[in-house]
Amino acid sequence: MTRQQAAEGLTVQHDALGIYLNDHFAGATLGADLARHVASRHRRSVRSPLLERLAEEIAQDRQVLLMIMDELGVPVRRYKVCAGWVAERVRRLKPNGVLQRHAGLDTVMEFETLRLGIEGKSLLWLTLIALAPQRPGLDTARLQHLLDRARQQRDAVEELRLTAAVAVFAQPNTPTSLER
């Protein structure tokens, strides 16, 4: 392999990593915005402290990803960030079967969307852990901490999602865990 071919191979790999990280950054933008929206909507709920903590952690994770991109020399593609922001706003326009107010189904779908985003973030951290031995600047211990935190976030959101789903889809006159 010539020096030029090796350099081109590294450029292609770097470009692919840049695309991958920017796609995750766009998703992180959507996720952070959604988490803030959900926390705000449930600010009078007993779940408020948990939702506020999750929103803060998800926003922090987005910032860490931004720092990692900077450390790796990956520029942020603003159009992808804008696309993530727009996608979250468009998601809110989806009809929910109820006019003029939030329905329980919205809550279930928001928790499912958050869960999917957290799963994607977990896969990102796993990928970066696998790349760490070949990429200076990727701190395995930091990435493992982020992965562990994402797993805790996933578990917390799943518990909220299941509680909301049971409340929304339970048969009429059947007590739910929210009523017990």
Image: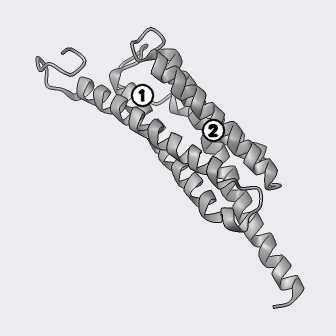
The amino acid pointed to by label 2 is Asp
Quarter of the image with the C terminus in it: top left
Question: From where the camera sits, is residue 89 visible?
Answer: no
Q: Is residue 25 above or below residue 129?
A: above
How far across and how far down the image is residue 56, in percent? 59, 26
The amino acid pointed to by label 1 is Pro
Callout 2 crowding tier (Cα within 10 Å): few <14, some 14–19, many ≥20: some
Which disc number belongs to residue 61? 2
- Would residue 170 appear left or right of 54 to someone viewing this image? left
Whichever of callouts 1 and 2 sits on the residue coming sooner in the sequence is 2
In this orientation, which residue lies closer to the viewer: 170 or 155?
155
Q: Residue furthest left?
A: 173
Q: Is residue 16 above or below residue 38?
A: below
Spatial CA span between label 1 and label 2: 30 Å
Q: Is residue 134 above or below residue 49?
A: below
How far across and how far down the image is residue 64, in percent? 69, 41
- Would residue 175 appear left or right of 131 to someone viewing this image? left
Q: Residue at x 74, y 43 (%)?
A: 66
Tag 2, which secondary structure? helix
Q: Residue furthest front?
A: 141
Callout 1 crowding tier (Cα within 10 Å): few <14, some 14–19, many ≥20: few
Q: What residue would you read off at disc 1?
A: 95
| Front: mark 1 or 2 | 2
Image quarter of residue 16: bottom right
Question: From where the camera sits, is residue 7 visible?
Answer: yes
Quarter of the image with the N terminus in it: bottom right
In this orientation, which residue lies closer to the viewer: 30 or 160?
160
How far across and how far down the image is residue 165, in percent? 28, 30
Q: Residue at x 76, y 44 (%)?
A: 67
